[in-house]
Amino acid sequence: MDSMHRSRGFLSPLTTFNHLEENLENHGSVPTENFETYYRYLERVREEYKERAIEDVRHALAYDLDEIQRQGEKYMDHVMAYIDDDTVEDEITGREQEPDEKFLRDVEEKLDVPGDRKDDFRQEVANWVSRRAREGEPFEPQDNDRLRRALERKLWEDKKHNINFSALVSSGELDDDERNAWVDALEEQGYSTEGAKEVLEFAGAEVAKAEMEE
C-alpha cells in the first residue's frame, strides 16, 4: 500500500479490494489464466462484505436494547397465548384479545420462517424461555441469537422510514452528536473510529439506494 493509505492509520477492506483489483494484472507472479478466477473471488468477497457492512450499520442505526426487550416480551406473551389457546391483555385498552398473529408473523418473517413452520419456531422459542426459567435465568431476548436477529430486523423496519439515509454519505447534513452515536455503536462491534466512518458512508449509500428502489 502506498504512503497515502499508510498515513490514514488503518487498512480498510474497501482500500484492499481496490488495490487488488487495480494491481492484479500487474503482479508478475499471477499467471494470466488465473485473472478471471481471482476477479470472481474479489467480486464474491465484495458482495459478502457489502452484506455484512449493511447489517452492521443497520444494527448501529436501529439497535435499542430496551426496545428489543419490550418487543421480545410482547412476542413471548403472544406466543404463549397462541400455544395455550389463550388470550392476552391489550397493552392500551387492557382488554383480553386473541394473540396478534400479524405481529407474530412480522417478527418471524424477518428470519424467513414460512407459515407452515411457524408453530415449530414458536415452540422452539417457548422451550428456550421455559428452560431459562427453570434455571432461574431472566428472559433476555438478546441471548437467543435467532430471536434477537428477528427483533433487530423488525426494529429496523419500524425505524428506517425516520432515518435520513442521504445524510450518511454527506457529513454536512448530519448532526455531529447523531453521527458520533452511530460511530460509537460501530466501535462497540469492533470497528476502529476511521473504519466506522468509512463503513457508515459505504453502507449508508448502499442502504439509501436500496430504500429508494423499494
Image (spheres, rainbow, N blue to C red):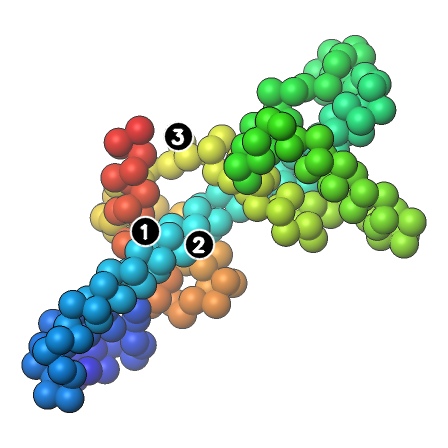
Above or below, comparing residue 96 to residue 22 in the picture: above
x and y percent of residue 123 in the render? 76, 36
Q: Which residue is mark 1?
A: 203
- Report whether 121 appears left or right of 15: right
Q: Amino acid at mark 1?
A: Ala
Q: Nearer the viewer, residue 199 or 37?
A: 37
The secondary element bearing badge 3 is classed as: helix
The answer to whether mark 2 and mark 1 are in CB contact below 8 A is yes
The secondary element bearing badge 2 is classed as: helix
The answer to whether mark 3 and mark 1 are in CB contact below 8 A is no
Q: Amino acid at mark 3?
A: His
* Distance from Cα at disc 3 to Cα at disc 1: 16 Å
x and y percent of residue 185 in the render? 48, 56
Q: Which residue is mark 2?
A: 56
Above or below, comparing residue 182 to residue 161 in the picture: below
Q: Residues within 10 Å of mark 1 (few under 14, many from 20)?
A: many
Labels 2 and 1: the sequence-earlier one:
2
